[in-house]
Amino acid sequence: MAGTENQQSAKDSLSPGRQELFEGVNGTNSYEELLARLGYRLTLTQQIHVQDAYTRVGLAGSIKAVLPYYDIPTQSSLPTLVNIDSTVTATPKSASFFNAMLAALKTQLSAQH
């Protein structure tokens, strides 16, 4: 039982609560601001080759994670790279898409509060 309590305690300390998430999202006006609040700087590039990015994951390639988001309604590939140097690389199209998603999320959160 103590192990379960310790796991829950660790999870609670790592996961922000509902109010903290609301304040974090509601306190930003753009995807770039949200990333900055989370400790990342947004950099834009014209194109991201997802398969190539996967080959550069790790210290030698400077990519921490590849987030290959695909939006089915628009049939758009919107990949994002999380880099080891605390930057997030996205295309202008994906940054614009996630700005719109953030605005929609803020609207939903405001309706619930």
Image (cartoon, helix red, strand yellow):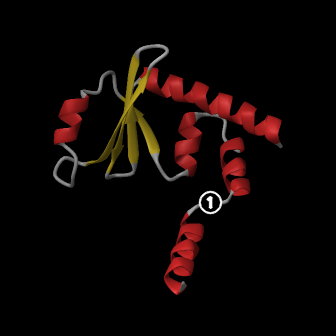
Q: In front: 3, or 51? A: 3
Q: In front: 66, or 27? A: 66
Q: Which residue is mark 1?
A: 16
Residue 25 horizontal/vertical position (percent): 66, 44
Which quarter of the image is occupied by the N terminus?
bottom right
> Which secondary structure lies at badge 1?
loop
Residue 34: quadrant of the picture: top right
Residue 102 horizontal/vertical position (percent): 62, 33
- Residue drawn at 49 percent across, 15 percent down: 73
As drawn, is 34 to the left or to the right of 43?
A: right
Residue 23 horizontal/vertical position (percent): 72, 50
- Residue drawn at 50 percent across, 53 percent down: 39
As drawn, is 77 to the left or to the right of 49?
A: right
Is residue 30 positioned above or below 2 on the image?
above
- Residue drawn at 71 percent across, 45 percent down: 27
- Residue drawn at 53 percent across, 86 percent down: 2
Residue 54: quadrant of the picture: top left
Residue 111: quadrant of the picture: top right
Q: Mark 1 belongs to which amino acid?
A: Pro
